[in-house]
Image: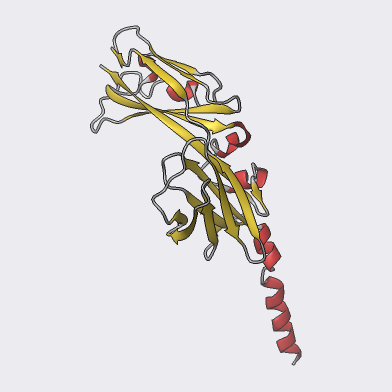
Amino acid sequence: MKKWIYIVLFFSACKPEDSQLADNSAIYGTWAAGEKPVVEAIIFDDETYYVNTNQEFELVFPDGQEVPFALNGAVYDLQSQRTPQPGERLTLRWFRDSDTALVEVDIPPAILDLSVSNDTLNASQSEECSIQWVAPSNEVEYAFRLECIEQNPQNLPWAPGNFATLFSGPQVSTQLQLDPQSFACLGTHRLTISVLNNALLDAFFYDQSDIRGLLKAGPDNVKGGNGFVSGVSKREVLIEIE
């Protein structure tokens, strides 16, 4: 009889309590205006993390429409073709075992009055492409991404260029000056300007190979749970290098 009691006590000690699982569970995501929202839910510890299955989520749009999410592989997909729009505030409901966690997700407004001068540069000349816009709010910053979209790119002598070095973090300026040294190859490049909420900048700039560090340190905008869901709006510009 004592032997069976010891076995029961051993497995009871090894089994995580529900409260411990709750403390180690988190959600995260970055929702872009015009793109389908997804939620990632994980359980993590100091060594590893894995997908938290059997979770229930629901998105409430500003007009009151309620749309559920469903697990699709490692992420939860919104079960609708409707997408967030610039300037909207959305509510994500996370139905946990004993309560409901809430996330207010603000999609930043789109940038205004964007203008581009000299969108075609000669790689052998000292030229500049100037991009300017009007800030949609005082509570936003910007992230820039430049990519060559040629199917068979021909690298420039100075590839990969200095763009990543100059614009690796959040920016506050509402203008951008690019010269041929910024680009990696001849042909068409796509510049993406992302508008970010100041309060959740860290949610955009992190090491995507391991999310645990960011979830432990914050930011956290999940009321009644752990994690974050941030919003961005984007604007794209095409630039040619000849």
Coloring scheme used: secondary structure
Q: Is residue 69 visible?
A: yes
**Percent from the top left, x then y, of residue 226?**
64, 52
Q: Residue furthest right?
A: 2
Viewer-side residue, 4 vs 98? 98
Left/right of residue 179 with respect to residue 31 in the rendered view? left
User: Based on the displayed image, in which of its 4 quarters is residue 241 positioned?
Assistant: top left
Left or right: where 137 falls relative to 175: right
Q: Residue furthest front?
A: 63
> Which quadrant holds the C terminus?
top left
Residue closer to the observer: 8 or 27? 27
Q: Is residue 51 visible?
A: no
| Residue 192 drawn above or below residue 38 | above
Q: Nearer the viewer, residue 81 or 217?
A: 81
- Where is residue 109 drawn, in percent x and y? 51, 31
Residue 189: x and y in percent read 32, 25
Tally the numbered discs. Answer: 0
The residue most toward the top is 126
The relative height of residue 148 versus residue 134 in the rendered view (above or below) is: below
Q: Is residue 141 left or right of residue 80?
A: right
- Vertically, is 216 above or below 240? below
Q: Residue at point 49% right, 23% down?
A: 167
At 26% from the left and 28% from the top, the residue drawn is 153
Residue 135 at x, y percent in the picture = 52, 22
Q: Does residue 129 sit above or below 208 in this rendering?
A: above
In the orientation shown, which residue stands out farthest toward the bottom? 1
Quarter of the rendering occupied by the N terminus: bottom right
